Amino acid sequence: MFGLGIGKHKRSLQIVFAACLAPLKDELGNIPIPMQTDPAINGAILGACEAYAQHHNITKPSDIAVIADAVFEDLYRRESIEVQHRVDEWKNTNDDAFASAYQDAKSKTNSEPNLSWLTEYAVNNFEPATGKML
């Protein structure tokens, strides 16, 4: 009703992803910049968002997009739109790394997502953000 339920799900996923990627964040809450251009991590993020939505019987594409957009915006902040454009490109061109991570995330995510598998992947594949300004 009027998107109230969607707001609850957006917030839940924002909290889950923030905790999942906390080991990589700098003191300002930024995640590593190389994550912006990595098809696998972003495929996993989108796949987890979509699987979570499906487990909560959210089937309207625009509602699913609102939830995923909130997660990407929370993680990437100002770069969110650029990242989401890349995600669309990877999805539309069937990028192998993106598609594999996307499907893997969909199979691992349920209505109460435990993203420890994503934390492990991120920690093993990215250096923590430093927060240093040049």
Image (cartoon, rainbow, N blue to C red):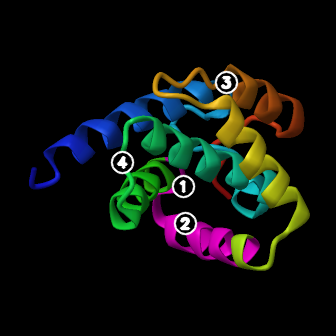
Callout 4 amino acid: Ile
Which of pointers 1 and 3 lies earlier in the amino acid sequence? 3
Callout 3 amino acid: Pro
Quadrant in which residue 131 is drawn: top right
Q: Residue at x 80, y 58 (%)?
A: 99
Judging by the rendered image, the residue that carries numbered circle 2 is 79
Q: Give me the C-alpha separation between circle 2 and circle 3.
A: 20 Å
Q: Residue at x 63, y 48 (%)?
A: 47
Cβ atoms at labels 4 and 3 below 8 Å apart: no
Q: Residue at x 39, y 52 (%)?
A: 67
Q: Give me the C-alpha separation between circle 4 and circle 2.
A: 26 Å
Which of pointers 4 and 3 lies earlier in the amino acid sequence? 3
Residue 8: % across, % down = 25, 36
For the residue carrying disc 2, how many other residues have a C-alpha within 10 Å: few (<14), some (14-19), or many (20+)?
A: few
Judging by the rendered image, the residue that carries numbered circle 4 is 58
Which of pointers 2 and 3 lies earlier in the amino acid sequence? 3
Judging by the rendered image, the residue that carries numbered circle 1 is 76
What are the residue bounds of the magenta stretch? 75-90
Say which of marks 4 and 2 sits in front. Answer: 4
SS for callout 4: loop
Which of pointers 4 and 1 lies earlier in the amino acid sequence? 4
Question: Is residue 39 in view from this perspective?
Answer: yes
User: In the rendering, which numbered label is found on residue 39?
Assistant: none
Cβ atoms at labels 2 and 1 below 8 Å apart: yes
Residue 35: % across, % down = 73, 52
Cβ atoms at labels 4 and 2 below 8 Å apart: no
Callout 1 amino acid: Tyr
SS for callout 3: helix
SS for callout 1: helix
Residue 116: % across, % down = 68, 20
Which of pointers 4 and 2 lies earlier in the amino acid sequence? 4
